[in-house]
Image (tube, rainbow, N blue to C red):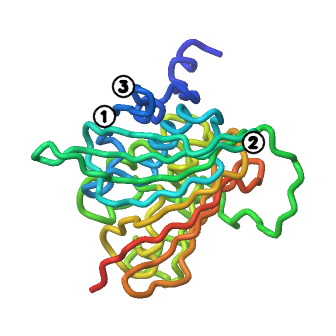
Amino acid sequence: MPEAASAATPTRATIGDSEFDRDTALTARAPGVYDIDLSAGWTIINAVNGGYLLAVLGCALADTLPHADPFTISAHYLTASQPGPAVVRTETVRTGRTLSTGQASLLQYDEEGREVERIRVLASYGDLDALPDDVRTTAAPPAMPPIEECFGPQDGPSPVPGSSAITDRLMIKLDPATLGWALGAPSGKGEMRAWFGLADGRDADPLSLLLAVDALPPTAFEIGLKGWVPTVELTVHVRSRPAPGPLRVAITTRNLAGGFLEEDAEVWDSADRLVAQSRQLARVRLG
């Protein structure tokens, strides 16, 4: 390769050496106690993204438990997290040969120096590489246009006021069929589909899947709503270690009632495997 061409080729980040890894890295203060400075780079509107926060807690539990891979992780979001110092406390609940279970809390301090719990998590971890290869499923990858026929945040104005720093760290290309909200004509179907990856080219791993399920614009936009849709509870099931390459994320909402909606997400890898599923309950602001 000519020297000029080689110099123009961007270097892809690798797992363990990317902005995502640096921004989810924790410093152990004592057994089960970790310090972290939550990066402002993962904010949307005025709060830190819930998927990034879940990945932070996921990293802490991976360090605490004898197994490294999240199989199922359920988080309750108690108060909005802000960029800046935070403490994560973990506890081992049970350890077994194939699964270990732990819990974790992320805390920050208010203006008077008092601890405020932001998120509480219960999770089970195992070894994804030890799972059998047998797959029996009726699930199918989402039908989406090629990535070059989809559109990202850079192709249009910001849909909501406030920070959108997280979009600079993600590669999101939305299916045009789920982009009616951006054109002032939402479909009302409550669907969102996109090609997904990290902007620096880092391939996905089990911990970054915790970010992927909560990184797309909310389905509420395509229902015809605007503004922040804060997560109340989010449960993620990681089913397989993803193959290299971009992911496909499909999210649907079937029911909005009483000011709350559910979002069911599926994440598919480049080998057409369903690698993660999630369901979250979120609050919407009507009127």
Residue 159 locus on image (x, y percent)? 33, 65
Q: Earlier in the sequence, mark 1 or mark 3?
A: 3
Q: CA distance from mark 1 to mark 3?
A: 13 Å
Viewer-side residue, 89 vs 206: 89
| In the image: residue 258, left or right of residue 171 | left
Residue at 53% over, 33% down: 64
For image coordinates 61% across by 41% down, the residue present is: 204
- Is disc 3 placed on a helix, strand or loop? strand
The residue most toward the top is: 3
| Residue that numbered label 2 is attached to | 98
| Earlier-in-chain disc, 2 versus 1 | 1
Name the residue type under label 2: Thr
Quarter of the picture containing the C terminus is bottom left
Q: Is residue 215 above or below residue 180?
A: above
Answer with mark 2 or mark 3, whichever residue precedes in sequence. 3
Q: Measure the alpha-carbon separation of dots 2 and 3.
A: 28 Å
Q: How many marks?
A: 3
Disc 1 element: strand
Residue lying furthest left in this view?
Answer: 112
Q: How far is mark 2 from mark 1, CA to CA?
A: 32 Å
Quadrant of res 278 = bottom right
Name the amino acid, label 1. Asp
Q: In this rendering, which labeled residue sits more in front, label 2 or label 1?
A: 2
Give the labeled residue for mark 3: 29
Q: Identify which residue, 158 or 115, lies in the foreground.
A: 115
Read off the residue under disc 1: 37
